[in-house]
Amino acid sequence: MAKDKASRRPRAETPKGFRDYFGADVTERKAMLDAVAEVYHRYGFDPLETSAVETVEALGKFLPDVDRPNEGVFGWQDEDGDWLALRYDLTAPLARVAAQFRNDLPSPYRRYAMGPVWRNEKPGPGRFRQFYQCDADTVGSASVAADAEICAMLSDALEVVGIPRGDYIVRVNNRKVLNGVMEVAGVLDPSDPAKFEAERGIVLRAIDKIDRLGETGVRALLGSGRKDESGDFTKGAGLSDEQAEVVMGFMAARRDTGAATAARLRELVGASTLGCEGVQELETIAELLDVQGYGPDRIVVDPSVVRGLGYYTGPVFEAELTFEILDEKGRKRQFGSVAGGGRYDDLVKRFTGQSVPATGVSIGVDRLLAALRAKGRAGAEAQGPVVVTVMDRDRMGDYMAMVGELRRAGLRAELYLGNPKNFGNQLKYADARKSPVAVIQGSDEAARGVVVLKDLVLGAQIAAGASLEEWKSRPAQVEVPRADLVRAVQDMLS
Amino acid sequence: MAKDKASRRPRAETPKGFRDYFGADVTERKAMLDAVAEVYHRYGFDPLETSAVETVEALGKFLPDVDRPNEGVFGWQDEDGDWLALRYDLTAPLARVAAQFRNDLPSPYRRYAMGPVWRNEKPGPGRFRQFYQCDADTVGSASVAADAEICAMLSDALEVVGIPRGDYIVRVNNRKVLNGVMEVAGVLDPSDPAKFEAERGIVLRAIDKIDRLGETGVRALLGSGRKDESGDFTKGAGLSDEQAEVVMGFMAARRDTGAATAARLRELVGASTLGCEGVQELETIAELLDVQGYGPDRIVVDPSVVRGLGYYTGPVFEAELTFEILDEKGRKRQFGSVAGGGRYDDLVKRFTGQSVPATGVSIGVDRLLAALRAKGRAGAEAQGPVVVTVMDRDRMGDYMAMVGELRRAGLRAELYLGNPKNFGNQLKYADARKSPVAVIQGSDEAARGVVVLKDLVLGAQIAAGASLEEWKSRPAQVEVPRADLVRAVQDMLS
């Protein structure tokens, strides 16, 4: 098995599905996350940074069988035989922390977390095996005020990073209403929760596919089943047309005002206790937001939000960007979802046996950053450093003094540190660095106590092979006394 | 092997050797790294964020044999049979990136990187298997101006995070001078570099242990060998007393001025070409720093810096904090090293076959943060949020409106989201949150249009079981009109 080491060099390659982030990739994401963190902080959320590595046991969901676990996580066995794995999200580590430190943490515990997570999945275009998540959760509060707070905070966060009001909407739905609808449709029996579990699973999966399958496809899955284009048949939930009508009605229940939507939902859930509770929760959330000024222009009750309804147990939220962008085929389409969340039970129960209610939201960091770039709020070409060139290699001290002065004045500045022999390479370097100003001082200028400043923004494209003479003859350059270096560069930059 | 799932709950435990960072742990480190990044940016360094996962092949140093690699890294085999591992430092990924993107990156390439690295080592007190590194490197410059720049930048970074001038010193040494000394001592033959390799290894390991073994121990290792307290014998390099004297002289070569130190080093390296080159480099570095105002009060040539001399190939730097702290036994000692680096060859050569010179520095993030805390520059008790308490659970909207107003005014504020029944729990919560002000409004206050503000900083310790009546009777509280809430809280906080 062992390869012959001497036979070839190692490949310099990012592992499949991973990528590197350079310069502005890093700083723009950081600026966005810093702004979000500032909002979370103001809402009283505390940062938590767990380690990248968790025990597979704590992560749950995945269990080592015969070999290593390979269902979606990167895992390995440590020297004691315990299985460890990279976290696949930020919620599982929160559950572990909430259980492990339950006697030390404030209750309720508001925390935010930002950082990479890892998925052992097939990488695809734009789909990586390491990516950032940005979560905020409140653990230990059963109050829907906690859900309302998360929605308000999400709205503030979107605005603070640069999505103007009107360009986004936070939609709220509730799993309990859907459960009430299921009760009315006859696939949920409150006295026997296990009954119809298979049917409800089909219903949940069906409504989750409404975007892809359309109303007809979903109706087929709610009924006897659906044959797709390839001829494969998916078994349906077996609902009658009347039953299916109730479920379809739920997704289409949105009316012009929150009150009208709630009234329509009350009709749909009929006598279902759980359903009525769900409608009441939605009304309360809307009221609590309203008193803070978060009206339906920002946060709206919308039963058509179905994503995540299968996972969450109460309120469900989704933030959508409503402005249009051009897709890869040049067609206009709405940007779509950038964040989602909801209330989930039994976060901590796995560990302690005690039920702990929790609610939270996760921002899709890469998608939101892409949205900001689409809106011109990020991704502007960052200006590079001033580059001090080297004409005489035995006067490095003089050049270093210049760059030192510029830096002390708060300017971003570099000394060219490559081989100075070919001056053209220095200009190419300044170009690659997107440098706005090059500082030049040959022995002639040094003798006269001056420096030459080349305005590279004006001068634009430096011809690849331009000689020093050609280049110095261009217009956008000035000669200034050496003593005026900093002021003159500042002028040129302003 | 498979355990009975039903038989027990998973343990809520951080994996051995890993830890969680809460609140100020996260924000203080972030503030420090942000300040350092700002300096690096001004020097023209660009951020790079590589993925946590690398191929074992690219990481080098570790090779999969029969089983998984377990020499210091966390590694696993992916579905294609390739070995992947978590990075153990930030230099190996830089080497991979510099090779992989050599046609796209500016040359020289200045980059900084900050982030966690992982070591599969026995954890110990204060020693974790995941920790932060903060590196800055210049790849592709053979000029000692690059080394000088790193030293100046390190000095600026220490000051900007809060280590005042005079409390630190950056020391510079040079591996080439040591090689010159080895040549004079007769354990390096420039015409046959492989000769005496074993002896030189012993010399390098010996001088690296000067802190622990003292002069006598090192002399023994340079000579015939050394028996330690347990009776174990370590073979020496076999140098004669005269040869050993040259090596010891190198470490003791520091004089009052840089010029005197250089003169002493010139004596020691005699006719060695490499040695003279090394002394010349040290002199040039000192000159280049001097013209920028980095005198020996900040950066000094010091041949007693021996750490890393075995690893680096040219200049070596170390930043030490010179103020005293009390150690765990209450004795005064210098804080010691917080950063180190140097010049290393063949970073990229492993991949491309082409030699690429590089130099860089790594800041020990945890040690520097500990130093800042020791100096009172970090770790100050952070003030918690204003807590709006809940007296009437059917007036959640009123309370939420209050917290919303406070937040919009830029104040950090929370609504109590736990079960409001036991008011004492709300006060305990405010205490746990280090809240400076609690806002209280019962139905009585609501009817009169006022709120009660409790100054918790003044009021100090809230007795665990204090009843609402006892508590409200304490002095540090005021009643203000509801409309004046924000202003009154601002007054109390100022």
Image (spheres, coloured by chain):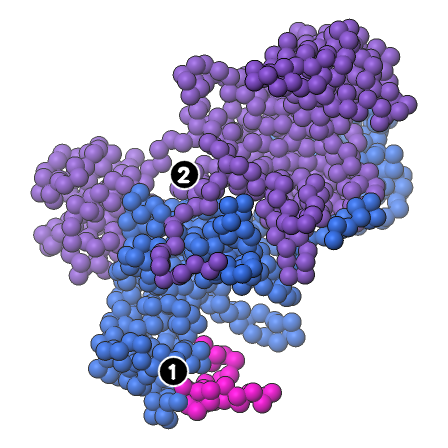
Chain colours: A purple, B blue
Q: Taking B483 as reference, is A168 left or right?
A: left
Q: Which residue was labeled with disc 2?
A: A24
Which mark, by number, is residue B455?
A: none
What chain is tagged by disc 1? B
- Image quarter where the C terminus of chain B lies is top right
Which region shows up in magenta? B208-237
Task: Depth check: give the residue in front, B197 or A305.
Answer: B197
| Element type at mark 1 | helix
Q: Is residue B161 visible?
A: no
Crowding near the residue tagged with mark 1, few <14, some 14–19, many ≥20 C-alpha atoms within 10 Å: some
Q: Which residue was labeled with disc 1?
A: B199
Task: Depth check: give the residue in front, A291 or A181.
Answer: A181
Q: Taking B15 as reference, is B242 left or right?
A: left
**Dot 1 amino acid type:** Glu
Crowding near the residue tagged with mark 2, few <14, some 14–19, many ≥20 C-alpha atoms within 10 Å: some
**Dot 2 amino acid type:** Ala
